[in-house]
Amino acid sequence: MGKISPVSAKYIVHTNIQIEGVVDRPDIIGAVFGQTEGLLGADLELRELQRSGRIGRIEVNTDVKTGKTAGVITIPSSLDKSETAIIAAAMETIQRIGPCNAKVRCEKIEDVRISKRTYVIDRAKELLRTLTEDILPDSQEITEEVEKSVRMMGISEYGKDKLPAGPSIDDSEEILIVEGRADVLNLLKHGFKNSVAMNGTSVPKTIIELCSTKVVTVFVDGDRGGDLIIRELAGVAEIDFVVKAPDGKEVEEITKKEIHKALRGKVTAEQAKMDLKDSGPKKNSYIKKPVFQQRERQPYQKRAPVRQSKESLTVDKKKKFKELLDDLVGTRGAYILDPSMNILGKVPATELPTTIRSLKGIYAIVFDGAVTKDLTGLAERANVRVIIGMDSKIKPTETRVMIMTSSSF
């Protein structure tokens, strides 16, 4: 009799029944057909709908507890949603089943197509994810994987000391000297094939020989260990340029963008030696320096053009400096200005040394921090005329650069 199943139906009516007694399944089926007969007219007669296949097999599941029967009536329907809702509402008119009072309530009408659609979407997502991740890598992934393999195969052992190196050491006029094998691998990964590793802090003979025939750039980590290697190399070999990774980072972990940025900011070996000299011994010997040495320096400082910038500071310039300094409070940033008082850029205060070395034409620096000897030393060599900070750790007479602080305004 039932020509459709829940699988082929569009809707399924779920109805709960509560019966004050014990009845059998045929009693419930009989009540469904009997008490709805003639209620909805000939077009929605349940028996006729079932014969034509528009209503499927009515399923009844019951459970008897403490003399009462509870269960669920499930009716699959291929009618439209309005007609299905009418059939569902008609179920609630049933008041007796067999000799017992009953209460029937439609809980929901399930749209089978929505359930199927949801399943299709979820399954399609799962299949697409599997296809993308495990089966068909895109062309970019294939290219990157092949290039990476080629670069990794490019590392070799160079010279009598068998140092880790890229494949282009002999062919390149310029080479990069790094600390270890991992640094060479990272540079190879990003396309730099002319690097060679020292494999320790002591300088191998192979490195010394290379320094005598090649244009050498030393690329070290951005920490104190990198400074030690620069000093060691500069003492025994002829190096040309020095590059440091960003502060606190190692060459083996920096990105391609960071590598290019660091190389653009390279300084000469002479400049690097002076920077190390300024940042090293002065810190340790400043307190121990005899008084007569300080007095001997005074004539030189008095002859230097210390006051030249002060004479040229107009009211408008001072006002501009104060506005910029107020704007930087709490930011740990720095403004770089040209002689026309135009802002060349804004950088973190920690990058001031690199900026001063690499940028020409700096007239003034305004920054959120304390003015130090190291900073003024770099500024003097770059012909910076004015430095404005929140406070200062040196006296104005100790530098040719004009120093101003927040208290100056």
Image (spheres, rainbow, N blue to C red):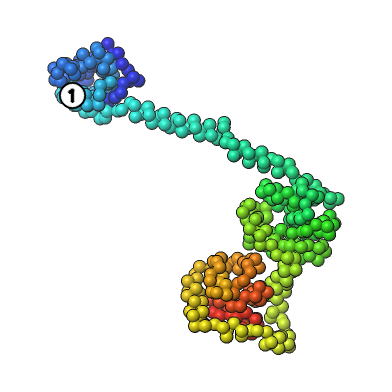
Please give left or right for residue 347 compared with residue 20 in the image.
right
Q: Kindly identify the amino acid type of the residue bearing the numbered disc 1.
A: Ala
Decide which of 147, 178 is in the foreground and name it: 147
Can you say whether 291 is above or below 345 in the image? below
Q: Is residue 190 visible?
A: yes
- What x and y, as percent, mark residue 81? 25, 26
Q: Say which residue appears at 66% left-offset and 38% top-offset.
A: 146
257 left or right of 92?
Answer: right
Q: Nearer the viewer, residue 194 or 3?
A: 194
Question: Which residue sits at x=20%, y=17%?
Answer: 46
Where's residue 332, x and y in %? 53, 68
Q: Is residue 293 above or below residue 104?
A: below
Q: Is residue 303 left or right of residue 96?
A: right
**Label 1 Cα neighbours within 10 Å, binned few <14 / some 14-19 / many ≥20:** some
Q: Residue at x 42, y 31 (%)?
A: 121
Residue 145's quadrant in the figure? top right
**Residue beneath disc 1:** 90
Q: Residue at x 63, y 39 (%)?
A: 143
